[in-house]
């Protein structure tokens, strides 16, 4: 069935991204917005836009019932959920189906199969996808716990079966900590997820986070679009992503992409999806979880593959076959993405709230910016403070990195503090450049450089610049640091 009118149930950069794809396909592109987003960019670029409630997400972007009733009222035949919000909500998918609206995503069954972590591990094992050594069932007794932990060998990891994305995990280093840790993990899991089931895994030391992009249609065709390297992260928040990974050899790529396709087949998947793996120092990889949605970092895959993942998602939802064969795909060059957040490094990375007085975007050959804001936009407390994603392409990884350094220097955001200065430090770090970093990189290398306490009133601005200068180790960037992080008085002069 051809989609004529598509409602995008999201906001910010991903709503803009999806609305553009719909318009390119000749589909009427409909935005929904909360009262806080009346003047938002995604509302302005849509063909039509409808208010769905108050600013808090629970009263607007998470109100599946309201969104479906708007869709029915305006005659939208499909809903794209973006990421977050309703994107992995099986109940919402069922509600769409019952209302005769096409959900641009997987079936509710696929989402459910991958949502429960022990069930997903059981399924992966059965289909030959390597999982982290450990149990595929929740641990039932203290005796079993101690026995299994001894067999696996310490350190071990306790994880909530209902958890995911880093929530409900606990590292255990020795048998002394085991029973107490288990009981705590259980009660935390009950509190957080209403389900106390906990399982046990071998703790993988200093792994990399590698994920594989797949796409599948409703006719049983499956493709992979290679891997992404997502190890540069802080507190489970990704900061930089790349494709391909400099640590994945052609031999590993062959195996990990095949494993990802087997994972997708195991849950009868259709739509774009991501299979996350941990990769250890010996390049053994283990299934972690599957994300049954389009992801923030999908543009790096689009730049190296030439495939528009959102258009493919829409066509697949219409019942069409994937438009390309596996043998038509190859890795063309390298791409890197920096997630630009309105956040304050000197205030425990709290969101930096306020009006964006100036937003001057970088551009040029091999540069893509997916933005959700513009000059005049307000960054509010209600939503994730990601402002934009800067993605650069180059023939080699080095070219893409150099291009990123150049264009981040051209990027001007005035009115809120951003994490742009952090990227200069990362992109010049020897461990980033030689790809020897792992998931602990920022915690191990950056945190020790920062002061324990950032005092509110810096008497001498030069001292602060000196601290950040020491982090960035680049005198030529002093002005940049001053402009983006500190100086209010000189903000216009900085241009
Ligand atoms: C692990 C692990 C080490 N060993 N499991 C974090 C998110 C969730 N999806 C799984 N996570 C981890 N599971 C074992 N057996 C380390 C992590 C982990 C992590 C994984 C991917 C990306 C960033 C991470 C940051 C901290 C911990």
Image (cartoon, rainbow, N blue to C red):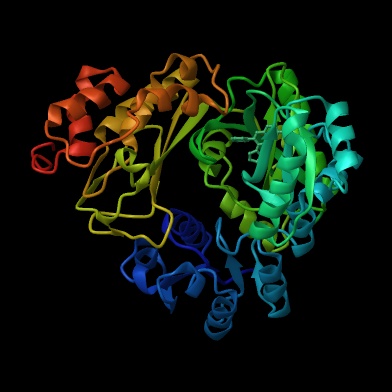
Could you tell me residue 327's position as x and y percent?
73, 33
Of residue 233 and residue 267, the one placed in the foreground of this image is 233
Place residue 369 in its image quadrant.
top left
Of residue 352 and residue 63, the one placed in the foreground of this image is 352
Q: Quadrant of the N terminus?
A: bottom right
435 w.r.t. 137: above or below = above
Q: Residue at x 42, y 74 (%)?
A: 48
Place residue 305 in its image quadrant.
top right
Could you tell me residue 246's position as x and y percent?
58, 20
Left or right of residue 333: residue 188? right
Q: Residue furthest bottom?
A: 73
Q: Residue at x 41, y 76 (%)?
A: 54
Q: Residue at x 45, y 22 (%)?
A: 445
Q: Residue at x 59, y 25 (%)?
A: 245
Could you tell me residue 408's position as x and y percent?
31, 32
Can you see residue 464? Answer: yes
Left or right of residue 348: residue 416? left
Of residue 41 and residue 187, the one placed in the foreground of this image is 187
Can you see residue 369? Answer: no
Place residue 429 in its image quadrant.
top left
């Amino acid at each position: 069935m051809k989609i004529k009118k598509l409602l995008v149930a999201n906001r910010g950069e991903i709503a803009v991204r999806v609305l553009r794809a719909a318009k390119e396909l000749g589909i009427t592109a409909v935005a929904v917005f909360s009262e806080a987003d009346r003047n938002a960019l995604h509302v302005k670029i849509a063909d039509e836009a409808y208010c769905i409630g108050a600013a808090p997400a629970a009263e607007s972007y998470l109100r599946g019932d309201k969104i479906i009733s708007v869709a029915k009222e305006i005659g939208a035949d499909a809903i794209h959920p973006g990421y977050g919000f309703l994107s992995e909500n099986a109940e919402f998918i069922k509600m769409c189906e019952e209302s005769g609206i096409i959900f641009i995503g997987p079936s509710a069954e696929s989402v459910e199969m991958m949502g429960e972590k022990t069930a997903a591990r059981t399924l992966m094992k059965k289909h030959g996808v390597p999982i982290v050594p450990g149990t595929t069932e929740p641990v039932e007794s203290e005796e079993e716990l101690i026995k299994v932990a001894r067999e696996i060998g310490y350190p071990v990891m306790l994880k909530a079966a209902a958890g995911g994305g880093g929530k409900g995990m606990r590292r255990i280093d020795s048998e002394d900590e085991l029973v107490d840790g288990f009981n705590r993990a259980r009660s935390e899991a009950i509190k957080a997820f209403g389900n106390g089931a906990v399982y046990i895994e071998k703790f993988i030391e200093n792994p990399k986070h590698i994920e594989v992009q797949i796409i599948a249609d409703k006719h049983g065709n499956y493709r992979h679009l290679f891997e992404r390297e997502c190890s540069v992260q802080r507190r489970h928040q990704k900061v930089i992503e790349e494709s391909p990974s400099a640590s994945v050899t052609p031999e590993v790529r062959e195996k990990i992409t095949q494993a990802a396709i087997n994972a997708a087949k195991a849950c009868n998947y259709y739509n774009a999806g991501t299979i996350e793996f941990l990769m250890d120092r010996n390049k053994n990889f283990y299934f972690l979880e599957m994300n049954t949605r389009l992801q923030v970092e999908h543009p790096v895959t689009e730049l190296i593959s030439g495939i528009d993942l959102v258009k493919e998602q829409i066509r697949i939802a219409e019942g069409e076959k994937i438009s390309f064969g596996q043998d038509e795909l190859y890795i063309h060059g390298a791409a890197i993405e920096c997630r630009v957040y309105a956040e304050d490094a000197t205030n425990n990375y709290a969101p930096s709230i306020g009006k964006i007085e100036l937003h001057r975007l970088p551009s040029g050959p091999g540069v893509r910016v997916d933005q959700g804001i513009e000059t005049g936009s307000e960054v509010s407390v209600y939503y994730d403070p990601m402002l934009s994603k800067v993605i650069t392409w180059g023939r080699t990884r080095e070219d893409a990195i150099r291009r990123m350094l150049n264009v981040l220097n051209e990027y001007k955001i005035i009115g809120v503090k951003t994490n742009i200065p952090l990227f200069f430090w990362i992109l010049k770090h020897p461990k980033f450049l030689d790809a020897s970093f792992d998931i602990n990189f920022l915690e191990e290398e950056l945190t020790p450089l920062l002061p324990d306490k950032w005092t509110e009133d810096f008497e001498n601005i030069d001292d602060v610049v000196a601290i950040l200068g020491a982090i960035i180790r680049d005198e030529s960037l002093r002005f940049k640091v001053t402009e983006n992080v500190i100086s209010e008085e000189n903000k216009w002069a900085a241009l």
